Image (tube, rainbow, N blue to C red):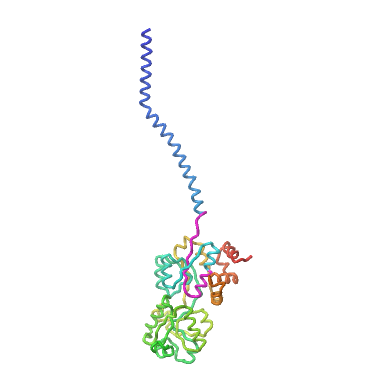
């Protein structure tokens, strides 16, 4: 009996020992179990991340807003009208907010290079050759289309009645003899040439040509202050039959209304197309340019501008409507918007410039049914 108890006791002790040994190896077993358990949540987390990728992309596409497109608010009539038409199409056809920064040629082109300006509807070459080369060299500025038809321009323009009375006045260098015709009471005997505004790129051409042609001692270059001042001075001389000398270009309203004559200069080709060397201006290329960011931010607007066209048959009637109506009570707050509505209602050529959706949007906004 005692022996049996001893055997039983020995068996119990052995079992306890086994249990102790088992307890000692328990962390290894638990560790393996934990690792297996962890593998499942990791796979679940990965599945959740994959699911999240789709809604994020959809949300970005759905909520992305079209940014504001800023136009160069240049200070002459043709571009004021073109800005009105183009910005109306961009806003009401393509759904972009639009704005403009007022100013003149030189500072606004610098703004185009820096990205403060998105669209410039009239970059005149060769007037802006230097700035154009700088802006396009590294791709900040990109030409996307043509604006006006080829324009003539000249530093030395007079009326036909002046030529009729002075048949010896043929060339710009003849002003060395005929400068007194254009003298003013306050010009000290010099002939006055009404030139480009100081912030227009053509001002530098006026100055250079006067100097290169040896006219500095007999010609005084004057700033008319604005396009309106320039046009008024040429109109007054035309109406009164008095003598006037100055810069002009065409097609413009004065060009259409008065018989103007360009004094002869050496052809542009003799100066490799650089009028600052004293030769005549070549036919001006008037381009539409954008900041390079537009290619990514508004490619549909770039496509529209690439198809845009503004020949003289649009330009002159639109400018006339603008000049006749811009100060009226119902239009004076936004004459560019008003001339756009007039043009888009009177013409249908613009429909070829835009997408079908943009065309429908514009007609809807104009109230066309």
Is residue 14 shown left or right of residue 55?
A: left
Q: Which residues are magenta?
A: 62-85
The residue at 49%/69% (across/down) is: 145
Residue 324 spot, x, y in % from top left: 55, 77
Q: Residue 369 occupies which quadrant of the picture?
A: bottom right
6 vs 311, nearest the viewer:
6
Residue 9 visible in rendering: yes
Residue 110 spot, x, y in % from top left: 41, 69
Q: Where 238 falls versus 355 (above or below)?
A: below
Tell whether position 27 is magenta.
no
Q: Where 319 falls versus 64 (above or below)?
A: below
247 vs 84, nearest the viewer:
84
Residue 309 visible in rendering: no
Residue placed furthest toward the right: 369
Is residue 204 shown left or right of residue 95?
A: left
Residue 54 spot, x, y in % from top left: 50, 48
Q: Residue 189 occupies which quadrant of the picture?
A: bottom left
The residue at 41%/33% (across/down) is: 34
């Amino acid at each position: 009996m005692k022996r049996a108890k001893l055997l039983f006791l020995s068996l119990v002790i052995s079992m306890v020992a086994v249990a102790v040994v088992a307890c000692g190896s328990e962390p290894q077993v638990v560790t393996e179990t934990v690792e297996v358990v962890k593998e499942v949540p990791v796979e679940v987390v990965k599945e959740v991340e994959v699911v999240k990728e789709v809604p994020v992309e959809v949300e970005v596409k759905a909520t992305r807003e079209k940014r504001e497109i800023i136009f160069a608010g240049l200070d002459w009539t043709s571009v004021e009208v073109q800005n009105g038409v183009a910005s109306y199409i961009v806003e009401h056809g393509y759904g972009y907010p639009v704005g403009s920064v007022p100013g003149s040629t030189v500072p606004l082109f610098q703004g185009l290079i820096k990205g403060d300006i998105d669209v410039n509807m009239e970059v005149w070459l060769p007037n802006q050759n230097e700035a154009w080369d700088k802006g396009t060299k590294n791709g900040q500025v990109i030409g996307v289309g043509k604006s006006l038809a080829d324009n003539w321009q000249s530093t030395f323009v007079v009326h036909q009645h002046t030529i009729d009375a002075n048949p010896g006045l043929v060339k710009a260098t003849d002003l060395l003899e005929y400068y007194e015709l254009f003298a003013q009471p306050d010009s000290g005997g010099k002939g006055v040439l009404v030139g480009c505004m100081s912030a227009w790129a053509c001002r530098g051409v006026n100055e250079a040509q006067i100097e290169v042609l040896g006219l500095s001692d007999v010609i005084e270059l004057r700033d008319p202050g604005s396009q309106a001042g320039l046009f008024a001075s040429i109109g007054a001389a035309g109406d009164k039959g008095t003598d006037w000398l100055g810069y002009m270009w065409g097609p413009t309203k004065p060009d259409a209304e008065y018989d103007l004559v360009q004094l002869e200069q050496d052809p542009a080709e003799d100066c490799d197309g650089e009028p600052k060397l004293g030769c005549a201006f070549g036919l001006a290329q008037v381009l539409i340019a954008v900041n390079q960011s537009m290619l990514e931010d508004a490619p549909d607007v770039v496509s529209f501008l690439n198809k845009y066209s503004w020949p003289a048959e649009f330009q002159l009637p639109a400018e006339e409507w603008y000049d006749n109506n811009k100060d009226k009570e119902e239009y004076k707050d936004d004459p560019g918007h008003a001339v756009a509505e007039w043009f888009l209602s009177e013409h249908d050529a613009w429909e070829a410039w835009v997408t079908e959706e943009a065309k429908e949007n514009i007609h809807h906004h104009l109230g066309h049914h």
